[in-house]
Amino acid sequence: MSKQYETVIGLEVHVELATKTKIFCGCSTEFGGAPNTHTCPVCTGQPGSLPVLNKQVVEYAMAIGVATNCDITPICKFDRKNYFYPDNPQNYQISQLYLPIAHDGYVEIEINGKKKKVRIHEMHMEEDAGKLIHDEWTNSSLVDYNRSGVPLVEIVSEPDMRNADEVMAYLEKLRLIIQYLGASDAKLHEGSMRADVNLSVREVGTEEFGTRTEMKNLNSFKAIARAIEGETKRQIELIEDGRKVVQETRRWDDNKESSHAMRSKEDAKDYRYFPEPDLVPISISKEWISEIKEKQPELREEKLARYKEEFEIPKYDAEILTGSKHLADIFEETTKLSGKPKKVSNWLMVEGLRLVKENNMEMEDIHFKPASLAIIIDLVDKGEINNQVAKEVFELVFKEDIDPEKYIEEKGLKSVNDTDELKKVVEEIIANNPKSVEDYHNGKEKAIGFLVGQTMKAMKGKANPGIVNKLLKELL
Amino acid sequence: MININELTALEIGEKIKNKEITVLETVDAFISQIEKVDKDVNSFITVDKEEARKKALLIQEKIDSGEISGPLAGVPIAIKDNISTKGLLTTCASKILDGYIPTFSATVIDNIEKAGMITLGKTNMDEFAMGSTTETSHYGETKNPWNLNHVPGGSSGGSCTSVASGEAPVSLGSDTGGSIRQPSSFCGVTGIKPTYGTVSRYGLIAYGSSLDQIGPIGKDVKDAVSLLSVISSYDEKDSTSVKRDDYDFTKYLVDDVKGMKIGVPRDYFTDDMDTEVKEKIYSAIKALEEKGAIVEEFNLSLVPFAIPAYYVIASAEASSNLERFDGVKYGFRAEDYDDLHSMYKKTRSEGFGSEVKRRIMLGSFVLSSGYYDAYYLKALKVKALIKEAFDKAFAKYDVIIAPAAPTVAPKLGESLKDPMKMYLSDIYTISVNLCGLPGMSVPVGKSEGGLPIGMQIIANRWDEANMIKTAFAYESTGEYEKCQMLKGGEA
């Protein structure tokens, strides 16, 4: 390959909003109900039913728009996107084409200390479709409309990204903004955040864009990175071969690490968009926008700055903690209860992250009561349990959300702090380990560690290690 | 003995209240008239006899106990078959909704039930309200009770004939481009198309969403206005519903047009019109002038552009509104198909009639990429200009008087041969829908051939008051035959 190529990437990101009810009716958005139980005439497209816009959807969309530096459209409208498919009960999707709620924004990303703006072309609100279930047994298809009408926003970026790292940084940035706003849990692996990648390649130095393809079915950060790499390679090979890149939509198969064409531009559907006559235009006043701005919670950057100022924790820890709104919430709540930010941070960074990793979890999956961790920290500080016991208890708190005090009580895990009781055991250990005693007297400081260990073992781990140490030194 | 079928709805309500007649007697009187004449006139797709009788007893109790006391309590009503009725077949006169029973009722149905009115059944119409003759119904054509060889007009033909032939005291229709006013004119009844946003569309199976309104049909102005007051309401379930200060329109039933400024558009009363229709309306205008109204002719302008603009907008919306009828969820599904696509294609090919298909194709075409600007956007611009023309007129006049149709009811089988000609006959009614105005048709006499002629009164948005005053003042000038009581066997 003699020529130098550059990849040009733009993203279309769908985010499922965290409203309790659907975008155009009062049905619940909750996951997991029996098929077609979260439905009504509106979200199943019954004749004569009419959509009524959920105000919370507009407010979430405005909040995301404001946080991504977009202009909010003062009078925005919905349009119908017409296409036939059974998961779409009306055979049109209510979306926004002509006057989307937000446009012309950007987010700032940082790659190796270098900052870069990724521009946002527009963001619009729309409804999700239902789900088709293919029953091989009866050779038929069934439709579940529970997801039909769940609110989404689609954020369309400009083609400003040049590699997978920038794409990851951009997605991570969006995810954090949206999570911090509480507008969505934005989980890529669960589908509450989905990204389609528009990608083209061009020779370095050229101004014109190459022909782009759109890649769908990317449901993890890793899949996106692999798809970018694969598609870049595929397009360069085509060009090097003297062939042309065809403008088309492709589907990524992450198992095969390859993609196949779904439809070309020629087969592209004509969606016959037109203004939705069943909904009136939404008029967004400056006052309403200010209200949303005022209500905007602390975002990640602000939180990071505050952590540096308020808590004496390392920058790296603060970055990890604020890298998930959920983890930051746990940190702050535990700190509020215990008043010991450094210790809380340590527990979360060391034990917490270890358990997340071991159990193949996301930070968002952590579910334990912050009070439990505060209690554990307190008990350790008071010397009522030792570190070993604390770790054991924390693991159970983390995994099963047990009540730590009750557990410690029931299992009799409290440290033995009674000097007389411990003295007897220590004397016994000294008597039974003359070799170590001798080593200690010969200047082998390490030998005392062995003796402490022996004492702890004899005490089934419950001895107060500080007292044991002190006693050993005295008695030796 | 009183002939219940000849009474107005308000008279019936009064007599029930005074215990001169019972609700069941009333319901039975109309059911027996339906049984007698409906095989000739075909007003109804579905008659809900048993349920109506059951309801009659229930409503009687509520009236006796004083729980319901409105002027229309106990009065039966016929409902156009594009208005959803929970548990009762609702077809839009289309094969594609074969067997469709709604799981919910339209807001207007809730409203009439609250008023103690009793649904007799569902009336025939042009398929999906597309047509001006009630000949495109899957359930056969409806005939004009004044002459069974003529059409009743459409699309609310069945609703108008049911009132005109004594099968129902009042009825509900829907009006997208004249579908209440034109058949009212052809059948000699009074029909109102309210200001867009006055009556909830929730449960009305949409044809052209931005144009559709449900409205009342009655034997006289008082009945129609009383029913309008019952069905009008602000409805949170319809985003295009508008909260009005007052929903009691009966207070405008006053015989006073002194100083009322009436505009008569010169460009409506052209030579294309039947002379008989023109003369009857002119003499009605004269009668109003004699009562003190100030009448002036003026040029409305843009009249010929209303029809193309209307057919582009209505068809575009219809092409999308009717997408949900696909054989997947309800109604008709074709028998043999190979895959999803062929199921869609066969179901819709077999399920829709030709007029509906024509408008779906027209609507899909004007929305398709490359044509959207040239047709749909242009039509919206024309609509805005027509609105301006009406705004200008209403700056000068309180009401505008126009024909409801250029002719009396045509003969059966004539109109569908030339759809273009049929579309052109909507010229006096469609602008009202494009601009969201209220309009109503009141009978002003009959042609030599004995067919009714209606006059259309149009007012500015939210100004039903002047429209109703004008209509009531005219009605108070003289008598007209309130309904054509069929005896059965006329055919």
Image (cartoon, coloured by chain):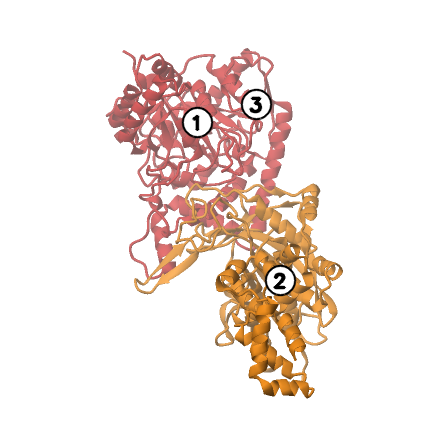
Chain colours: A orange, B red
The image quarter containing residue A175 is: bottom right
> Mark 2 or mark 3, which is nearer to you?
2
Q: State the CA–CA distance, disc 1 to disc 3.
A: 20 Å
User: Which mark, residue A301?
Assistant: none
> Could you tell me which chain the residue with mark 2 belongs to?
A
Point out the image quarter for the C terminus of chain A: bottom right
Residue type beneath disc 1: Pro
Find numbered disc 1 in the image and state the secondary structure of the residue it sits on. Answer: strand
User: Which mark, residue A377?
Assistant: 2
Q: Are marks 1 and 3 on the same chain?
A: yes
Pinpoint residue B65: horizontal percent, then vertical percent: 36, 18
Residue type beneath disc 2: Ile
- Given residues A178 and B251, the one toward you in this image is A178
Q: Are marks 1 and 3 in contact (CB under 8 Å)?
A: no
Query: Label 3 belongs to which residue?
Result: B399
Query: Label 1 belongs to which residue?
Result: B216
Q: Are marks 2 and 1 on the same chain?
A: no
- Given residues A318 and A217, the one toward you in this image is A318
Q: Are marks 2 and 3 on the same chain?
A: no
Residue type beneath disc 3: Val
> Mark 1 or mark 3, which is nearer to you?
1
